Image (tube, rainbow, N blue to C red):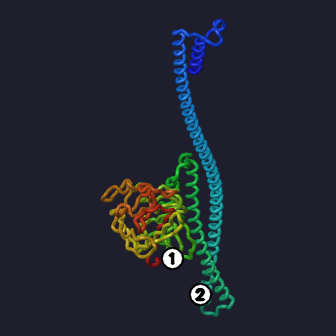
């Protein structure tokens, strides 16, 4: 609009400056005499033209700047729209993955329910067979008793060979039946243990399907403690077979070797002065070890309270913390070795071993270590005599360890190691952020976040 107005003014000024057609016809074609007034008007016209030209240049410069600013704003808006499109696409991908995981979880639950029903039917069938065997055993015992009465009556005479053979065969049958019954009882006990664990697992999956929300699934790490904490609890009479002799359970995983167990997995143990509970036993060439901690993928949040670290949390098949109560119940039975295995993001594995004792709850589970072997730096040796700390029970003298770091740990010197910190999927260059993760200080004093950890204990001598 400004440009249009200036053009109109220029046109008017030029029109005033030009002589009329009639006046030009009466003048001489080659010589014109100008009055002083006409000369001044022409100079004034040129000044106006220059002023207008300057105005037009300034207007063009302003328009150019305005066009550049507008282009920059449009580019900025386009960049933000591209970022929004990528974010929306990523959100759509995550939503599809969540839907697929939910469908897979539903299929797994259905399969476990069918497996549970099959195990239950098998258990009932075995019980019926045992009852029939017991009845046959009673009948055989009554026959043997009758034969013994007959032998007493014929004590003065010669016993026929046929009766002696019959008695011997009956005794062999009875002994064979007793061995069969013993084997069946053992099989039934093992079936009941597996059935109990399957029931607990199915209940956990059902609760996860009911209470899991989109936000809980989207955020990492997923807090699965509410789903699997009861798996790490003590077994009650409702969760174990009434006929099971709990005194026959092993004191720890090393007791499974004599029972012919060679595969790593979940088993039931009963330390002295403790109720039975599930543990994950790792069978190695050195024997059987009880795993007390494992980190794999960040699926369990280890930034928990004192009560959680005391009782235990997580999933025995994945990530978990066994619980200070259970670790103390196992370790106070004798001399134990603590084995720590770490894996970094280059998939390099190292280990270290210590002789290990743990004090009770009155001393906040004070740790005592002595270095044995391994290819990791011995930094836990500085932690001997240190109490366990969590964010709601910081017993450290400086009282800043659990505020600067996450998870519960024996924070000796406040920062040499923390295997219960937050799981980080990428290696962070930020020192304070790295301190909140899973780390173990190297020989050069640099702490690196770790990909996986595993802590296990085994006795220095074999439990029977």
Q: Which mark identifies residue 287?
A: 1
Locate residue 71 relative to residue 353 in the image: left or right.
right
Q: Position of residue 234 (x, y in %)?
A: 47, 61
Question: In terms of depth relative to the viewer, which is nearer, 341 or 285?
Answer: 341
Q: Which element is circle 2 on? A: helix
Q: Which image quadrant for residue 336?
A: bottom left
Q: Taking 392 as reference, is 169 above or below it?
A: below
Of all residues, the one furthest to the front in this rendering is 31
Q: Taking 373 as reference, is 424 above or below it?
A: above
Locate residue 114 relative to residue 441 in the image: left or right.
right
Question: In terms of depth relative to the viewer, which is nearer, 7 or 208?
Answer: 7
Of all residues, the one furthest to the right in this rendering is 162
Of all residues, the one furthest to the left in this rendering is 397
Locate residue 211 relative to residue 165 in the image: left or right.
left
Using the rendered image of the protein, determine whether residue 273 is visible from the camera's viewpoint. no
Using the rendered image of the protein, determine whether residue 390 is visible from the camera's viewpoint. yes
Q: Position of residue 226 (x, y in %)?
A: 50, 53
Q: Which mark identifies residue 152?
A: 2
Q: Position of residue 394 (x, y in %)?
A: 35, 56
Q: Which element is circle 1 on? A: strand
Q: Taking 450 as reference, is 37 above or below it?
A: above
Instruction: Give the position of the N terminus as an image quadrant.
Output: top right
In three-dimensional space, the C-alpha distance between marks 2 and 1, rounded to whole angstroms, equals 55 Å
Q: Earlier in the sequence, mark 2 or mark 1?
A: 2
Q: Which image quadrant for residue 67?
A: top right
Nearer the observer: mark 2 or 1; the answer is: 1
* Proximity of marks 2 and 1: CB atoms separated by less than 8 Å: no
């Amino acid at each position: 609009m400004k440009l249009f107005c200036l053009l109109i003014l220029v046109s008017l000024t030029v029109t005033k400056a030009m002589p009329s057609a009639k006046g030009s016809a009466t003048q001489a074609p080659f010589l014109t005499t100008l009055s002083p007034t006409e000369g001044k008007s022409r100079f004034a016209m040129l000044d106006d033209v220059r002023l207008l030209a300057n105005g037009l240049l300034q207007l063009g410069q302003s328009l150019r700047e305005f066009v550049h600013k507008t282009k920059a704003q449009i580019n900025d808006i386009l960049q933000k729209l591209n970022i929004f499109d990528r974010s929306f696409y990523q959100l759509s991908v995550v939503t599809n993955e969540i839907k697929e995981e939910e469908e897979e979880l539903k299929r797994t639950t259905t399969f476990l329910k069918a497996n549970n029903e099959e195990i239950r039917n098998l258990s009932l069938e075995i019980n019926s067979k045992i009852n029939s065997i017991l009845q046959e055993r009673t009948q055989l015992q009554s026959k043997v008793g009758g034969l013994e009465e007959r032998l007493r009556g014929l004590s003065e005479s010669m016993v026929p060979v046929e009766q002696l053979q019959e008695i011997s065969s009956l005794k062999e049958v009875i002994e064979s039946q007793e061995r069969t019954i013993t084997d069946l009882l053992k099989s039934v006990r093992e079936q009941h243990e597996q059935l109990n664990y399957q029931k607990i697992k199915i209940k956990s999956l059902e609760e996860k399907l009911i209470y899991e929300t989109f936000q809980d699934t989207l955020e990492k790490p997923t807090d699965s403690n509410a789903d699997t904490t009861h798996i790490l609890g003590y077994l009650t009479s409702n969760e174990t077979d009434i006929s099971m002799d709990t005194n026959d359970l092993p004191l720890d995983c090393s007791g499974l070797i004599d029972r012919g167990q060679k595969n790593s997995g979940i088993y039931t143990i009963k330390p002295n002065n403790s109720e039975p509970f599930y543990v994950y036993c790792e069978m190695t060439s050195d024997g059987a070890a009880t795993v007390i901690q494992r980190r794999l993928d960040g699926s369990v949040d280890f930034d928990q309270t004192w009560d959680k670290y005391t009782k235990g949390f997580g999933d025995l098949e994945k990530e978990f913390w066994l619980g200070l109560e259970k670790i103390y119940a196992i370790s106070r039975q004798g001399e134990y070795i603590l084995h720590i295995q770490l894996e970094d993001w280059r998939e390099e594995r190292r280990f270290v071993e210590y002789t290990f004792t743990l004090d009770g709850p009155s001393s906040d589970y004070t740790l005592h270590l002595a270095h044995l072997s391994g290819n990791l730096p011995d930094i836990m040796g500085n932690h001997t005599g240190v109490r366990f700390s969590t964010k709601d029970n910081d017993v450290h003298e400086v009282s800043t360890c659990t505020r600067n770091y996450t998870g519960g740990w024996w924070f000796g010197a406040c920062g040499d190691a923390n295997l219960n910190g937050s799981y980080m999927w990428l290696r962070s260059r930020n020192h304070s952020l790295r301190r909140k993760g899973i780390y173990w200080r190297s020989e050069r004093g640099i702490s690196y976040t770790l990909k996986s950890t595993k802590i296990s204990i085994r006795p220095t001598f074999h439990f029977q």
